[in-house]
Image (cartoon, rainbow, N blue to C red):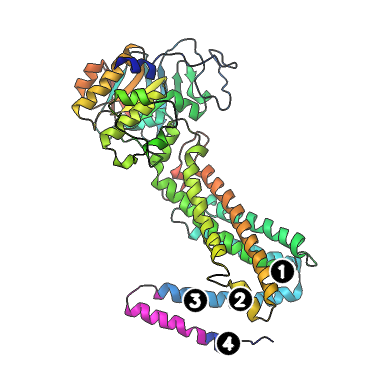
C-alpha cells in the first residue's frame, strides 16, 4: 500500500529547472505546467491573506509538518482554502517554496497547490471524463476504487466514492502542497483508514499538507499541528 | 396584380386572437394578458414603422436611414438585456448584447449591400433597412438565448467548472462546455428555421413577397440569401457575445465571477 503513495505525491523533484527561473525572481513561461526547480522546499507560507470572509497572517505549512485546520462549521476553513488556491476574490501574499503566488499564473499555482473540497465538483458526467490527467490508477487502487469503471456516471457513485476519487485524482497530480477539506467526513472507518494509510508515508516524505478536520483523533494519528480558525481569523495554534 | 387586404381584413384576422383569448380564459391557461399586450404592441410598432419607412424611403437620406437603423439597434439591445434571467451588472448588461448584435448584423448587412445586391447608393433604405432589420432581429434572439444559457450554465454548474479550474485548467478550458451549450442554445432557432424552411413552413418574407406579386423564383433567391445572412449575423454576434460573456464571468486569475451578475 505504501509504494504507490510515494509515487503519488510529496517531495519528488518535478522536471528541469525553468531556464528563466532564479531563486529570488522567477519568470514563468506561458503554458508552463510545473513549478520549476527551487533552491529549498520551504513549504506554503501565508504572510497575509484577506477576502470577504478571511483575514489571516503568518501561517506556515512546512514540508513534513502538516497542519490540521480546525474550527466549527462556518468558521472559514473552506473559505481559507479557496482563497489560498485563488478561487475566490482575495488579496495577500502567499509563497510556495519561496516563490510568490502573484508571480505565477493561476493555473500553474493550482497545479502546484492542489485543493480537494469537502464536496468535490465534477465537470463531466462520467468517471472517464475526469481521467484525462496524470495516471491515477495506483492512487485509485490504494483508495479501494478498483471497481470504478470509466463509463460509470459520476452521480451513481456514493458520496464516499466520489470523495476518494477526487483525492486519488488530486494525488495523481503530484502536488507541491495539498489542501484537503474534510477528506474523510463522508467515509466509513475502512475507507478512512485507507486515506490515512496513503497520506501517512507522504507526510513522512515531506508532504506540505493542510487538512480541515473535525476529528481530533485523526489529527493525532496523522501528527497534524492544530491551527484553529474562527470568524475567518486564526485563533490559535498548538 | 396585388390585392391590398385593407384595414378591415387585417382587423378580421384578429378574430382568431380574440378566440385564443377566450379559450385561454375558459381553460385558465394564463396567457391572455401577455398575448393581448404583445398583439397591441406589435400593431402600434408596425403602424409606426410603416409611417417611418414611408418617410425614409421617400427621402433616401443617409442620416435618416442610419438614424432608423441606430434606433432599431438600440431597442433590440434593450430587448436582449430584458430577456436575461441573470443579467450582467452595469454597462455590460446592455453593452455586451447590443454591441455584439450590432457587430454581427452590421458586418453581414454591409456585405450584402455592397457585394451581393449593390443598390445605388449602397445604403439605399429600401434594401438596407429590411435587411438590417431581419439580421438584427434574428441576431437579437440568438444572442439573448445564448447569453441567457451561458449565465444559467455557469451559475448552475459553478462547482463543476471550479473543479476543472482546480486541476490547473484555464478559464477557456473550464468554460468550454458552458460555451458550447450557450452557442447551441443561440443557434438552435436559426438552424431549426433553415431545416424546416420550404418543407414545413414557408418563411414570412418569401410569403410576403409572393403575396405582394413577386416572382416565386426571385422570392426564393431573396429568402435563401436572407437566411444565409441571418445565420451568419447570428453566429458571428453570438460567438463574440459568448466569448465576451466568458471574459466577464471570469477574470485574469481564472476565477468565476458571478458577482458581476446583477443581484449576485
Distance of label 3 from label 4 (alpha carbons): 15 Å
Q: Mark 4 belongs to which subunit?
A: B
Q: Which residue is mark 2?
A: B207
The image shows residue A235, relative to residue B1, as above or below, that is: above
Q: In the rendered structure, which segment of residues is drawn in magenta?
A: B12-32
- As drawn, the label of residue B7 is 4
Q: Is residue B132 left or right of residue A91?
A: right
Q: Residue at x 41, y 34 (%)?
A: A130
* 1 and 3 marks in contact (CB < 8 Å): no
Q: Name the chain under label 1.
A: B
**Residue at the farthest top position:** A39
Q: Residue at x 51, y 16 (%)?
A: A15
| Same subunit, tags 3 and 2 | yes
Q: Tell me the crowding category of disc 2: few under 14, some 14 to 19, or many 20 or more residues within 10 angstroms, Cα based.
A: some
Left or right of residue A60, residue A219 in this image: left
Give how far apart the Cα atoms at labels 1 and 3 are: 27 Å
Specify the label residue B127 is tagged with.
1
Q: Residue at x 53, y 23 (%)?
A: A103
| Displayed quadrant of residue A160 | top left
Between circles 1 and 3, the one closer to the viewer is: 1
Amino acid at each position: 500500500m505504501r509504494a504507490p503513495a510515494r509515487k503519488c505525491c510529496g517531495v519528488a523533484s518535478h522536471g528541469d529547472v525553468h531556464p528563466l527561473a532564479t531563486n529570488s525572481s522567477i519568470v514563468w513561461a506561458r503554458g508552463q505546467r510545473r513549478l520549476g526547480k527551487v533552491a529549498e522546499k520551504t513549504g506554503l507560507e501565508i504572510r497575509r491573506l484577506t477576502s470577504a470572509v478571511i483575514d489571516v497572517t503568518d501561517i506556515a505549512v512546512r514540508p513534513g509538518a502538516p497542519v490540521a485546520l480546525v474550527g466549527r462549521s462556518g468558521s472559514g476553513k473552506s473559505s481559507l482554502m479557496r482563497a489560498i488556491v485563488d478561487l475566490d476574490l482575495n488579496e495577500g501574499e502567499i509563497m510556495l517554496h519561496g516563490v510568490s503566488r502573484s508571480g505565477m499564473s493561476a493555473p500553474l499555482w493550482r497545479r502546484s497547490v492542489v485543493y480537494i473540497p469537502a464536496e468535490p465538483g465534477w465537470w463531466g458526467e462520467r468517471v472517464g471524463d475526469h481521467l484525462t490527467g496524470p495516471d491515477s490508477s495506483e492512487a485509485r487502487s490504494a483508495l479501494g476504487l478498483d471497481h470504478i469503471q470509466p463509463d460509470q456516471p459520476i452521480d451513481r457513485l456514493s458520496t464516499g466514492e466520489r470523495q476518494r476519487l477526487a483525492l486519488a485524482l488530486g494525488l495523481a497530480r503530484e502536488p507541491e502542497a495539498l489542501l484537503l477539506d474534510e477528506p474523510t467526513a463522508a467515509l466509513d472507518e475502512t475507507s478512512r483508514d485507507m486515506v490515512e494509510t496513503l497520506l501517512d508515508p507522504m507526510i513522512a516524505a515531506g508532504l506540505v499538507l493542510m487538512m480541515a478536520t473535525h476529528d481530533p483523533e485523526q489529527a493525532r494519528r496523522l501528527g497534524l499541528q492544530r491551527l484553529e480558525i474562527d470568524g475567518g481569523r486564526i485563533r490559535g495554534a498548538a | 396584380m396585388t390585392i391590398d387586404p385593407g384595414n378591415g381584413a387585417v382587423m378580421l384576422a384578429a378574430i382568431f386572437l380574440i378566440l385564443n383569448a377566450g379559450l385561454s380564459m375558459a381553460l385558465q391557461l394564463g396567457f391572455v394578458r401577455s398575448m393581448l399586450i404583445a398583439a397591441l404592441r406589435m400593431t402600434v410598432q408596425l403602424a409606426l414603422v410603416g409611417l417611418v419607412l414611408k418617410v425614409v424611403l421617400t427621402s433616401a437620406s443617409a442620416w435618416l436611414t442610419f438614424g432608423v437603423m441606430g434606433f432599431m439597434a438600440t431597442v433590440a439591445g434593450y430587448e436582449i438585456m430584458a430577456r436575461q434571467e441573470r443579467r450582467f451588472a452595469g454597462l455590460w448588461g446592455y453593452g455586451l448584447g447590443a454591441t455584439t448584435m450590432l457587430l454581427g448584423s452590421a458586418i453581414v448587412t454591409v456585405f450584402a449591400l455592397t457585394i451581393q445586391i449593390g443598390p445605388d447608393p449602397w445604403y439605399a433604405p429600401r434594401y438596407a433597412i429590411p435587411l438590417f432589420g431581419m439580421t438584427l432581429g434574428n441576431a437579437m434572439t440568438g444572442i439573448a438565448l445564448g447569453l441567457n444559457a451561458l449565465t444559467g450554465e455557469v451559475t448552475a454548474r459553478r462547482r463543476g467548472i471550479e473543479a476543472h479550474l482546480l486541476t490547473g485548467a484555464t478559464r477557456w478550458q473550464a468554460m468550454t462546455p458552458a460555451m458550447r451549450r450557450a452557442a447551441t442554445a443561440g443557434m438552435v432557432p436559426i438552424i431549426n428555421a433553415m431545416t424546416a424552411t420550404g418543407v414545413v413552413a414557408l418563411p414570412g418574407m418569401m410569403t410576403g413577397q409572393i403575396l405582394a406579386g413577386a416572382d416565386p423564383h426571385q422570392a426564393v433567391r431573396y429568402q435563401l440569401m436572407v437566411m444565409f445572412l441571418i445565420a451568419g449575423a447570428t453566429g458571428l454576434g453570438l460567438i463574440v457575445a459568448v466569448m465576451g460573456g466568458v471574459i466577464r464571468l471570469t477574470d485574469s486569475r481564472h476565477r468565476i465571477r458571478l458577482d458581476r451578475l446583477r443581484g449576485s
